Amino acid sequence: MTWTVAAERFDSPDASALRRDYYDEVASRYWNRPATAEEVADGLDGDGADLLVPPTGQFVVGRYGSKAASCAGLVLTEEAGAGTAELTRVYVRPAFRGTGGGGLLLAAVEEAARAYGVRLLRLDTRDDLVEARGLYTKHGYREVPAFHRRNPYAEHWFAKEL
């Protein structure tokens, strides 16, 4: 089996299922119990995914063989400033972790960011998302001081110069 990563609309059936799984996992970890369907729906409601399309961003889906297995998003925000964008919704389904898909996701988003003229890609994450923090560090992201306080769940901030 091999990985492929390609741009896809955030609301395609596969992308929607991946986004739902992402919110289910991050909410379940945060609450230290399975997230309810209502909590997942609340997380998806008004989450800003509409920015994950040109010209404000992009969403990518990774497939392992033919199975939708991962996703990530790029958001270009005015708040971030010229030449800066944010990496978001990075997720690899548990069954596919450790197979190289996470690095390919990051590479695809970084390539899209460069095409937009982005020179600095940044993100925020939480303490309990250990695998994500390891992935970012492995692929050249460095921990930086907080660059915003709008996300009440953010505990770590990372950036990478492209």
Image (cartoon, helix red, strand yellow):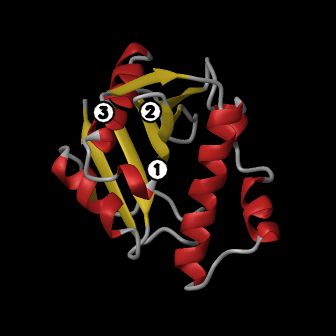
Q: Mark 1 points at which residue?
A: 91
Residue wearing tag 3: 104
Outermost bottom residue: 32
Q: Going from the N terminus, do you reach mark 1 or mark 3 first?
A: 1
> Which quarter of the image is occupied by the C terminus?
top left
Residue type highlighted by circle 1:
Tyr
Q: Where is residue 93 in the image (x, y as percent from the top left)?
A: 46, 52
Say if residue 118 shows up in the picture: no
Q: Residues within 10 Å of mark 1 (few under 14, many from 20)?
A: many
Disc 2 versus disc 1: nearer the observer: 2
User: Do the residues bearing badges 2 and 3 touch, measured as CB atoms within 8 Å?
Assistant: yes
Disc 1/disc 3 C-alpha distance (Å): 12 Å
- Spatial CA distance of label 2 from label 1 is 10 Å
**Left or right, 71 with reference to 128:** right
* The one of 151 and 34 positioned closer to us in this rendering: 34
Q: Is residue 62 above or below residue 93?
A: above
Work out whether residue 110 can be spotted. yes
Q: What residue do we see at 37% from left, 49% from top?
A: 96
Q: Where is residue 39 shown, x and y percent of the image?
A: 76, 70
In the visual, does 59 lie left or right of 2?
right
User: Between marks 2 and 3, how big is the CA–CA gap?
Assistant: 8 Å
Say which residue label 2 marks: 62
Three-letter code, disc 3? Leu
Label of residue 75 in the image = none
Going 58% across and 34% down the picture, which residue do you hit?
78
